[in-house]
Amino acid sequence: MFNKCLCLFNPEANFGRAQKLRKLLKCISEREGNVDWKETIKPGHAGELAYQASQAYSRIIAIGGDGTAHEVANGLMQMNGTKRPELGIVPIGSGNDFSKSTGIPNQPEKAIIYALHSKAQAIDLGRLEMGRGLVRYWINVLGIGFDAKVDIYSKRLKQLHGFWVYFIAALQTILRNHVPYHLDGKVNRQEWKRDLLMLILSNGKQEGGGFKIAPHANLSDGQLDYIAVKNISRIKMFFAIPFFLLGTHNRLPFVETRGVTRMQVKSDQPLCIHADGEVLAGFDSTINQLNLQVVHNALKVVI
């Protein structure tokens, strides 16, 4: 059990709808004792606060969406492993995919009690090197190409909520940005070359508010689930959407799945990239080389 806990609340989660939960969740945290409360004021702030607080607290709770958990996890990963605080999660974002696939309660008032009192366990993280010393970790899903473009469009659909945000964004991507990448490199140290619309390395089971992208993923098996979609037509991509919703896309001849521990990627054009719903490289990307790998039992998380 932790000695002291910090709650990091993102009032802009779920397009600002999270602000309605501030009073309730802060009241519950103050009742528990030995718990402090801080709020984020800008993108990336949760990671900064987590890193600054990591020596004073033994558990840090991310109150927000998958992006907030992503930021906090990255802040904690800057600390030495023996001193790294545990991570708790209270899902109040638009998708909350990591929480949904790991059994974290979806009611905020139950989730915060769970995050404060339940035992943490070690899970794997993905690690991404983008060159120029840029390193990011992901807790749930990393997407390249189509998947990342969907995430970019989803952030413009503030009038929608949950699954529909990502579904409409997927349709927009099919119509506007159906462009494949020629990729080569190494997968598990073996030479690899593909023409792909989408490449995903998943640690968790789902993304996009309910797309079961890796239904058999295991957070502590020491590998990431690789899902690749070949260069297919717009009609076939539209046809594939229900299969990804149900988690049966491995039946499709143009979808490739496997387990991956490390991967090197080089592209013929700049890559669009997201990690846990956070856009790392958008339509103005200049990144075309990546090193990716799993970090086994990297972080203790309450799941």
Image: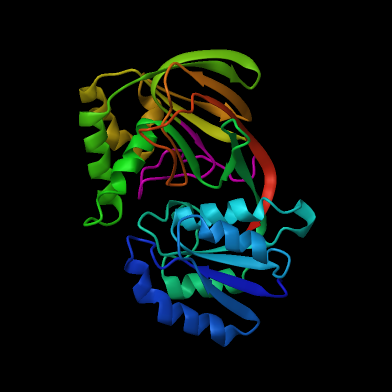
Q: Is residue 13 above or below residue 183?
A: below
Of 147 and 45, nearer the camera is 45
Most common secondary structure along the magenta stretch:
loop
Does 216 appear in magenta?
Answer: yes
The one of 119 and 6 positioned closer to us in this rendering: 6
x, y (%) of residue 283?
A: 35, 33
What is the quadrant of the N terminus in the image?
A: bottom right
Is any part of residue 141 visible from this angle? yes
Magenta-drawn stretch contains 129: no
Q: Is residue 126 left or right of residue 18?
A: right
Which image quarter is the C terminus in?
Answer: bottom right
Give the left or right position of residue 133, taking residue 158 as reference. Answer: right
Residue extending furthest toward the bottom: 31
> Residue 49's image quarter?
bottom right
User: Residue farthest to the right?
Assistant: 82
Q: Residue at x 55, y 14 (%)?
A: 192
Q: Which residues are magenta?
A: 200-222
Residue 270 position (above or below residue 12): above
Looking at the image, which residue is at 65% across and 59% down? 51
Q: Residue at x 42, y 31 (%)?
A: 285
On screen, 162 above or below 243? Answer: below
Q: Which sits in the foreground, 48 or 26?
A: 48
